[in-house]
């Protein structure tokens, strides 16, 4: 998910991710391999690889696994050559826009799987460009708003962050994707503990939905994210934080 509603469910989502760590490591390794394949194996000279490696480290992926994934991406072989990033665009219940990021070695298989999951979940697959205009690719860092104040986070602005806003009890720091690593490093150096840091497709505007529609959307997103090839799902829906927490606790 993406949007202001997302942060209310970070801790719960992390618990779900941890429970699926085996599958998560496989997805993270593939993302690292593709980034290394496309931009080289030097983390300092390849921003996409740096972000993929940091995401793997956040998930406690072993260093050996990360190094093997980089080596695979800079090597050769039919399996590596076939891997590519693909973005699918679609709609969920309530007409909510969905961007679905995937890493695949078979576009036809993954496209058919995504289409089936969307249809089964009350959504539909759209044409390229049909919903992407609703999103901006941004780096986003979440920080506990009860533990820190805005003054504590000014180091992020100095490091290149675009904006800092408080959503409920969570500060959301927005950056350009290329600045996320520097902003994160500045916060780490200042001793600021992060709840989450990642590059997302951030919706330009949110579509309010009721509890029933939100429940259907969450089920659809979970089913999509459970697919081996799907790396992330972004949506532009908004729902009351208490409703979201209740629905995620019940999932």
Image (cartoon, helix red, strand yellow):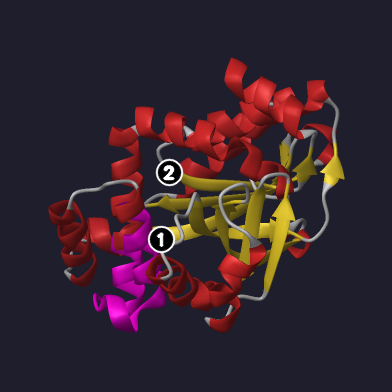
Give neighbour class at mark 1: few <14, some 14-19, many 20+ (Cα, 10 Å): some
Give neighbour class at mark 2: few <14, some 14-19, many 20+ (Cα, 10 Å): many
Judged from the image, the secondary structure of the residue bearing numbered disc 2 is: loop
Which residue reaches farthest top?
A: 250
Magenta segment = 33-56
Give above or below for 125 relative to 34: above
Judged from the image, the secondary structure of the residue bearing numbered disc 1 is: strand
Q: Could you tell me if the residues under marks 1 and 2 are in contact, i.e. CB atoms within 8 Å?
A: no
At 63% from the left and 69% from the top, the residue drawn is 151
At 71% from the left and 42% from the top, the residue drawn is 5
Reading the image, the residue beneath label 2 is 229
Q: Quadrant of residue 125?
A: top right
Cα separation between marks 1 and 2: 10 Å
Residue 40 highlighted magenta (yes or no):
yes
In percent of width and height, residue 247 lies at 67, 21
Q: Is residue 49 left or right of residue 143?
A: left
Residue 9 highlighted magenta (yes or no):
no
Q: Main secondary structure of the magenta part?
A: helix
Q: Is residue 39 left or right of residue 80?
A: right
- Give the camera-side residue of 166 and 131: 166
Q: Quadrant of residue 229?
A: top left
Give above or below for 31 relative to 76: above
Give above or below for 105 relative to 18: below
At 69% from the left and 71% from the top, the residue drawn is 163
At 16% from the left and 66% from the top, the residue drawn is 71
Reading the image, the residue beneath label 1 is 84
Say if residue 251 shows up in the picture.
Answer: no
In percent of width and height, residue 141 lies at 55, 59
């Amino acid at each position: 998910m993406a949007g202001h509603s997302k942060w209310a469910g970070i801790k719960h989502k992390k618990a779900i991710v941890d429970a699926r760590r085996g599958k998560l490591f496989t997805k993270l390794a593939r993302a690292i391999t593709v980034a290394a394949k496309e931009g080289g194996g030097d983390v300092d000279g390849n921003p996409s690889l740096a972000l993929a490696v940091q995401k793997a480290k956040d998930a406690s992926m072993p260093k050996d696994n990360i190094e093997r994934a980089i080596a695979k991406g800079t090597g050769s072989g039919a399996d590596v050559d076939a891997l590519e990033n693909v973005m699918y665009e679609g709609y969920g219940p309530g007409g909510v826009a969905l961007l679905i990021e995937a890493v695949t070695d078979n576009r036809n298989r993954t496209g058919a799987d995504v289409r089936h999951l969307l249809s089964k979940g009350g959504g539909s697959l759209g044409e390229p460009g049909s919903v992407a205009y609703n999103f901006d690719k941004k780096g986003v860092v979440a920080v506990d708003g009860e533990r820190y104040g805005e003054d504590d986070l000014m180091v992020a602005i100095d490091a290149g962050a675009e904006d800092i806003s408080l959503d409920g009890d969570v500060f959301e720091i927005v950056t350009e994707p290329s600045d996320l690593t520097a902003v994160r490093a500045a916060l780490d150096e200042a001793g600021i503990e992060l709840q989450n840091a990642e590059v997302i497709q951030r919706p330009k505007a949110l579509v309010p939905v009721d509890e029933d529609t939100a429940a259907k959307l969450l089920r659809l997103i979970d089913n999509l994210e459970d697919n081996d090839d799907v790396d992330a799902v972004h949506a532009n829906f908004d729902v009351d934080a208490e409703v979201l927490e209740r629905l995620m606790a019940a999932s």
